[in-house]
Image (cartoon, helix red, strand yellow):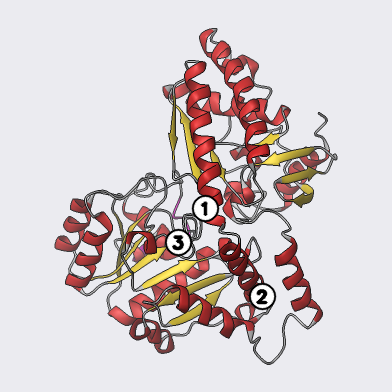
Amino acid sequence: MDINKGIKLWNRAKKIIPGGSQLLSKRSEMFLPEQWPSYYKKAKGVEIWDLDGNKYIDVNASIGACILGYADPDVNRAVKKAIDNGSNSTLNPPEEVELAELLCKLHSWAKMVRYARGGGEAMAVAVRIARAYSGKGKVAFCGYHGWQDWYLAANLANDKNLDGHLLPGLEPRGVPRELKGTAIPFHYNKIEELEKIVSQNKDIGVIVMEPLRHEEPKNNFLKQVRKIADKIGAVLIFDEVTIGWRLNIGGVHLKYGVNPDLAVFAKGISNGFPMAAIIGREKVMQAAQTSFISSSSWTERIGPAAALATIKKMIEKKVPQHLNKIGKFIIKGLKQVAENNNLKITVAGPPPLISFSFNYGEESQAIRTLFTQEMLKRGILISGGIYLTYSFKEKEAKRFLKAVAETFGLLKKAIDNNQVRWQLRGPIAHAGFKRLT
């Protein structure tokens, strides 16, 4: 296929937009340098059309933002109505009250809600509220939580502190050195690390974590974290920006029966429209009124309207059950195709949020790049993760696995003949954060 317009536009973008894109995970260099289509003309369901008119099946779902699928008609209808009736005014939109009531109904432990429009800023709001309530500045955290100062401060103490939390190589330049030691990481399922942190730091006021990503909690890990937070009087925040609503309606913490003090949701609750919500216990949430947390963008109508339509449809269509069913089918297929070709890969769940990697040491990233290149030829947009959507049905799953089977066969021959790098038509994809120019 011809991919010219997107590549040319990306090269223009890098000259006038630092980093090329507003989201690191959408950089072409993270997928397929010098070959990635980069821009889209249209997106519908599970399909994307690039600027040259090529059509693809996309398994990235806008990096997890669109749980229902692109341009969902029901969500779009609600958004268009909000626009036609005025997306903003001096008065507040009633949808934000209806959404707050719905979120509190779905999470009986939560009594109050605040809004933002992106995951990173919502996490910053949650940490601000938690610090205001606890009166303590230090944060113990586990997982990936965005780009804000409170989080990147972890790398002031050690530039590799964040490497095990999704994106290696994140530099804390621009983060005040005075924040050194205020954010301390611990690893998932390693409760002893959190125990050590709280024993050595008496001023931990906040514990932040993703309740789940690709690893199931072991030995009552979430309950143990909850117990430690209660013991030291820290506010427990669950970051559900990525995992929320995929395994069950509401946050995944509901599945495990462990309630935080605050929970944060974003992109997934509004099918890609800018929206985020911070829900929590009343006494903690009221601390928001003791600090200045305010933005005119948080009072517009489109986000809440999109979230209401998205959540109602997820409930009506039992979307998590569909994602789980298709995800299990994909995981089984990936493992079988890898076994058929004697390829060494690791596949991790949960089924609605699949991750897989090639286990070939230093050659793994080159192999992954070749995989992305060959899948692109077959009309599939993929890298190392699969975000399933309601629009992704068994038909698309079978086409996807057929393309994987063909590509895995090619990869096996390239590996056996030491031709992986020779078959690449461009540079190896970036594995972490790097400057582009």
3 and 2 marks in contact (CB < 8 Å): no
Residue 240's mark?
3
Magenta highlight on residue 172: yes
SS category of the residue bearing label 3: loop
Residue type at mark 2 is Ala
Structural crowding at the residue carrying mark 2, measured as other residues with C-alpha within 10 Å and reported as few (<14), some (14–19) or many (≥20):
many
Residue 184 location in percent, x, y?
A: 29, 58
Q: Amino acid at mark 1?
A: Gln
Q: Quadrant of the N terminus?
A: top right
Give the spatial CA distance, label 1 vs label 3: 18 Å
Indicate left or right for 98 with 231 as reference.
right
Q: Of the residues tagged 2 and 1, which is closer to the observer? A: 1
Q: Earlier in the sequence, mark 2 or mark 1?
A: 2
Find the magenta span and give its range: 171-178
Distance CA(mark 2)–CA(mark 1):
24 Å
Q: Is residue 136 left or right of residue 415?
A: left
Q: Position of residue 177 (x, y in %)?
A: 37, 62
Q: Is residue 169 magenta?
A: no
Q: Viewer-proximal residue, 415 or 342?
A: 342
Q: Position of residue 233 (x, y in %)?
A: 22, 75
Query: Which quadrant is home to the C terminus?
Result: top right
Mark 3 residue crowding within 10 angstroms, few (<14) / some (14–19) / many (20+): many
Q: Secondary structure at mark 1?
A: helix
| Residue furthest right in the image | 53
- Residue corresponding to mark 2: 305
Residue position marked by numbered label 1 in the rendering: 321
Element at badge 2?
helix
Q: Quadrant of residue 180?
A: bottom left
Q: Earlier in the sequence, mark 3 or mark 2?
A: 3
Identity of the residue drawn at 75% across and 51% down: 44
